Image (cartoon, rainbow, N blue to C red):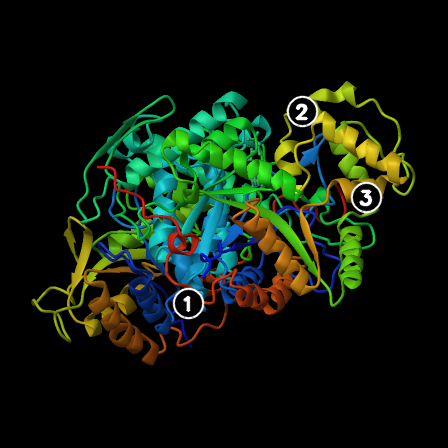
């Protein structure tokens, strides 16, 4: 017999402020009503997914002091929704994105431990690290944090949270804690006993070298987006290669890509559907908006179906490097457009020239996420190949439309993955850590 | 008739505080029990110093498992971020479809301050001043997206009418918030805000911002006097005094059988203890007390904290409440679906909404 196949990990992402939500689609439902969250989470649980995932944004996206009116702006607060979802699901993990910059360790550690108790061991925290003053204007300390400091704070934040969780011994005895570091100087007693997972699962999203190092040193899961198999393999090797430095095994960190899946009865039909969805997602207005965001100029005089104009991008390199003060980096990451480096802009330009694409077509092509498009069998094979080739440990699926877009995947692809032996046929354990095959954290006395 | 002597509806609420309970099931059971009694709402206390789970988390967990009862967690304002607090409370309102409340409290001790390491403990006046600012900022943030801001216009591609989103630009003494909120305006417009107005420093904040004030006093007259004071102060802030419901807060011990265990107690009225005014006696006598205080116009209702939640809440619902219902003094079902409806409070108009087309 061959060794057991590397199992695929699957998660579902409820789109937040995001162009994946097409509200013109009659199947789209409210992005705020609890029923929508319940539908998607239950579907994901029916599909035996590892976790259900919510992103976060703390200020409506804007540009030139105006809020984008094309955006789906507005979402509930993640941890509260997940606590409610804990009531209508039983096994699936519940992952909240919460910024480490605009929170305090004691309070957040307590909220996460509470979620872990109330869900009986299914909590996860996606640690994001905003540095921008734009978002900071909503918070007590404002946006004081330098870009360079955001990962040092995030790192100390996670370590402090773990100290708090560890202040209760596994046998139920608690001790006072004291933490004194660069960002936090706190002491007292943590009021929540050790939760079912010991430590809620920690997820990291952020692609810089600092971000990868942070992930390698401390995260259980990395949420990333790397388009091609090659890019995925390079990222995977890079991040897993950093683990040894921290005395960690490759299996202790799962790498999961945010992806979309479009299914059809034939390859051609799937491709047609995918094109149609992208056209819905990138409306003419959205195409112009995407240019405006990356250029920082007002391109509204251009025809979205006309050719890409020749604008000197170097002129606005601050924006091209993702250093905008308005939080557009986060916005773009969430939209599925990775931080816009100049090279990417050049790529977009080349793409447009080479293929003779219009502005809208260019934006559609350039902002495409990793998509798996095809028949259920082809998609199942491709997903499995991605994992087998060490480009990923799994995927975070962004369904379209919300919330019903995952139904078809669960009904048609999951059974094929199971037949192939690439995916579980039942939940073996009850906690998210057990779904992910992660070790129980050692208690650090 | 559910009211008598023109006193307005009787409002009843109960605390579901369980000591050292970390499993959702026990809380859900208590909330469900209170809901069977058609109580207006349940409360769950919280403090960063008390052992226990995050109260808002627990009641969010209870929301899908219940249908009508109001859910009121304590959320303190001293070390928390106003922006996060309002978002969490608004979200509780979304997941419960309009049943959220917020018991506003402050963190007084140096011990709590040390858990955050950001500032030292402050005097009560300062803390309540800040709590008022947080309540104010929260309400502005709840208004910062008008109802109907979402237009989902397929034709133009507009999702949102940006004229219906508003910066709040709130500047308080200890914090500022830009806005608008990230959470759309909650179903109730403003989730109900509740303040324990027993102590002086909290009273101004209660009169100005609370929908429900709880007063912990042993006597009917004393409670009635505080109620009048709160109503007058509310009017002074330009509010309709009927928009502020005043509930008497009692700790209840119903372990003593049908009637008061000690003569002159229970039926004779609560007595002061370290945990607040304690009523000890039978469910029937408690019903008498509730009816008498309410009919005298001293209170709009009661907030009851059972000493032994499982036992006393059961007796409260099946004994006291059943009797009040039997006498037509308390509702037997929920005619409305939101906490504001239970309390007879209107859904607040949005301060930013432009009526009549002027801008
Ligand atoms: C896949 C992915 C998802 C992200 N999701 C969020 C999010 O939901 N909310 C948020 O504030 N930031 C989010 N971010 C932003 C990161 O936290 C971080 O601020 C950003 O990637 C810049 O960090 P970096 O330089 O390490 O990439 C996300 C980033 C990535 C790569």
Chain label for disc 2: A
Crowding near the residue tagged with mark 2, few <14, some 14–19, many ≥20 C-alpha atoms within 10 Å = some
**Which mark lies nearer to you, 2 or 3?**
2
Q: Which residue is mark 3?
A: A285
Between residue B157 and residue B45, name the one nearer to us: B157
* Residue B312 location (% of width, % of height): 21, 67
Between residue B17 and residue A293, name the one nearer to us: A293
Q: Residue at x 17, y 45 (%)?
A: A173
Q: Residue at x 22, y 48 (%)?
A: A170
**Tally of numbered tags:** 3
Between residue B165 and residue A74, name the one nearer to us: A74
Q: In this rendering, does residue A141 appear at all? A: no
* Residue A226 location (% of width, % of height): 63, 41
How far is disc 3 from disc 1 in space, using C-alphas? 42 Å
Q: Secondary structure at mark 1?
A: helix
Chain label for disc 3: A
Q: Classify the position of the C terminus of chain A by image quarter.
A: top left
Instruction: State yes or no: Cβ of the residue under disc 1 lies below 8 Å from any atom of ligand 1.
Output: no
How far is disc 1 from disc 2 in space, using C-alphas? 48 Å
Residue B255 bears which disc, if any? none
Q: Which residue is mark 2?
A: A321
Instruction: State yes or no: Cβ of the residue under disc 2 lies below 8 Å from any atom of ligand 1.
Output: no
Q: Are marks 3 and 1 in contact (CB under 8 Å)?
A: no
Q: Secondary structure at mark 2?
A: loop
User: Which of the 4 image quarters holds residue B155?
Assistant: bottom right
Q: Residue at x 71, y 32 (%)?
A: A63
Q: Which residue reaches farthest bottom?
A: B326
Crowding near the residue tagged with mark 3, few <14, some 14–19, many ≥20 C-alpha atoms within 10 Å = some
Q: Is residue A389 left or right of residue A50?
A: right
Q: Is residue B67 left or right of residue A106?
A: right
Q: Which residue is mark 1?
A: B65
How far is disc 2 from disc 3 in space, using C-alphas? 24 Å
């Amino acid at each position: 017999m061959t060794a057991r196949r590397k199992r695929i990990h699957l998660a579902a992402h409820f789109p937040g402020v995001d162009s994946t939500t097409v509200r013109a689609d009659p199947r789209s439902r409210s992005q705020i009503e609890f029923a929508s969250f319940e539908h998607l989470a239950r579907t994901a649980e029916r599909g035996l997914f590892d976790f259900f995932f919510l992103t976060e944004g703390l200020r409506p996206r804007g540009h030139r002091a105006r809020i984008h009116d094309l955006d789906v702006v507005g979402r509930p607060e993640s941890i509260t929704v997940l606590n409610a979802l804990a009531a209508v699901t039983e096994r699936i993990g519940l992952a909240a994105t919460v910024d480490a910059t605009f929170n305090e360790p004691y309070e957040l550690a307590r909220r996460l431990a509470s979620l872990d108790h109330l869900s009986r061991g299914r909590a996860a925290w996606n640690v994001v690290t905003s540095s921008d003053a734009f978002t900071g204007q909503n918070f007590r300390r404002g946006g004081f944090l330098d870009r360079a400091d955001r990962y040092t704070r995030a790192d100390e934040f996670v370590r402090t949270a773990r100290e708090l969780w560890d202040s209760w011994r596994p046998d139920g005895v608690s001790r006072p804690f004291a933490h004194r570091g660069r960002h936090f100087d706190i002491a007292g007693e943590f009021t929540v006993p050790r939760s079912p997972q010991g430590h809620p699962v920690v997820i990291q999203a952020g692609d810089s070298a600092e971000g990868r190092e942070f992930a390698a040193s401390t995260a259980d899961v990395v949420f990333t987006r790397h388009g091609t198999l090659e890019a995925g393999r390079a990222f995977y090797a890079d991040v897993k290669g950093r683990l040894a430095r921290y005395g960690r095994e490759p299996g202790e960190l799962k790498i999961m890509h945010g992806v979309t899946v479009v299914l059809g009865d034939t390859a051609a039909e799937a491709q047609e559907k995918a094109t149609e969805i992208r056209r819905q997602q990138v409306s003419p207005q959205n195409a112009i908006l995407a240019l405006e965001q990356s250029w920082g100029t007002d391109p509204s005089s251009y025809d979205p179906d006309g050719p890409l104009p020749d604008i000197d991008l170097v002129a606005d390199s601050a924006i091209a490097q993702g250093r905008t003060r308005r939080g557009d980096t986060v916005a773009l990451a969430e939209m599925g457009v990775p931080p816009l480096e100049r090279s990417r802009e050049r790529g977009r330009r080349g793409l447009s020239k080479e293929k003779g694409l219009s502005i809208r077509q260019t934006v559609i092509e350039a902002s495409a996420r990793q998509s798996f498009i095809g028949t259920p069998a082809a998609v199942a094979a491709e997903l499995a190949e991605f994992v087998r080739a060490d480009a990923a440990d799994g995927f975070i699926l962004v369904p379209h439309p919300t919330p019903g877009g995952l139904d078809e995947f669960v009904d048609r692809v999951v059974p094929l993955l199971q037949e192939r032996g690439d995916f579980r046929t039942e939940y073996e354990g009850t906690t998210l850590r057990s779904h992910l095959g992660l070790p129980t954290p050692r208690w650090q006395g | 008739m559910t009211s008598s002597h023109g006193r307005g509806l009787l409002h009843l609420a109960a605390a579901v505080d369980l000591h050292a309970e970390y499993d959702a099931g026990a809380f859900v059971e208590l909330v469900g029990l209170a809901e069977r009694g058609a109580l207006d709402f349940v409360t769950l206390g919280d403090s960063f110093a008390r052992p226990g789970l995050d109260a808002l988390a627990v009641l969010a967990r209870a929301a899908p498992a219940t249908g009508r009862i109001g859910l009121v967690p304590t959320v303190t304002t001293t070390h928390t971020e106003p922006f996060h607090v309002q978002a969490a409370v608004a979200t509780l309102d979304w997941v419960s479809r309009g049943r959220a409340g917020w018991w506003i409290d402050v963190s007084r001790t140096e011990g709590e301050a040390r858990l955050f390491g950001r500032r030292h403990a402050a005097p009560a006046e300062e803390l309540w001043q800040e709590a008022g600012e947080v309540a104010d900022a929260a309400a502005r943030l709840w208004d910062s997206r008008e109802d109907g801001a979402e237009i989902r216009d397929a034709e133009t591609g507009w999702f949102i009418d940006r004229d219906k989103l508003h910066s709040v630009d709130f500047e308080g003494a200890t914090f500022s918030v830009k806005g608008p909120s990230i959470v759309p305006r909650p179903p109730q417009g403003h989730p109900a805000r509740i303040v324990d107005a027993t102590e002086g420093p909290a009273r101004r904040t209660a009169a100005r911002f609370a929908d429900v004030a709880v007063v912990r006093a042993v006597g009917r007259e004393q409670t009635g006097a505080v109620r009048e004071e709160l109503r007058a102060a509310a009017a002074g802030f330009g509010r309709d005094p009927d928009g502020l419901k005043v509930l008497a807060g009692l700790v209840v011990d119903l372990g003593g059988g049908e009637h008061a265990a000690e003569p002159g107690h229970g039926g004779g009225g609560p007595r002061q203890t370290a945990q607040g005014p304690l009523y000890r006696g039978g469910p029937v006598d408690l019903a008498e007390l509730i009816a008498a205080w309410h009919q005298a116009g001293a209170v709009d209702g009661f907030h009851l904290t059972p000493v032994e939640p499982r036992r006393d809440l059961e007796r409260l619902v099946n004994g006291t409440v059943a009797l009040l219902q039997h006498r037509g003094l308390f509702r037997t079902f929920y005619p409305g679906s939101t906490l504001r409806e239970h309390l007879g409070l209107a859904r607040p108009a949005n301060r930013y909404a432009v009526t009549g087309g002027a801008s």
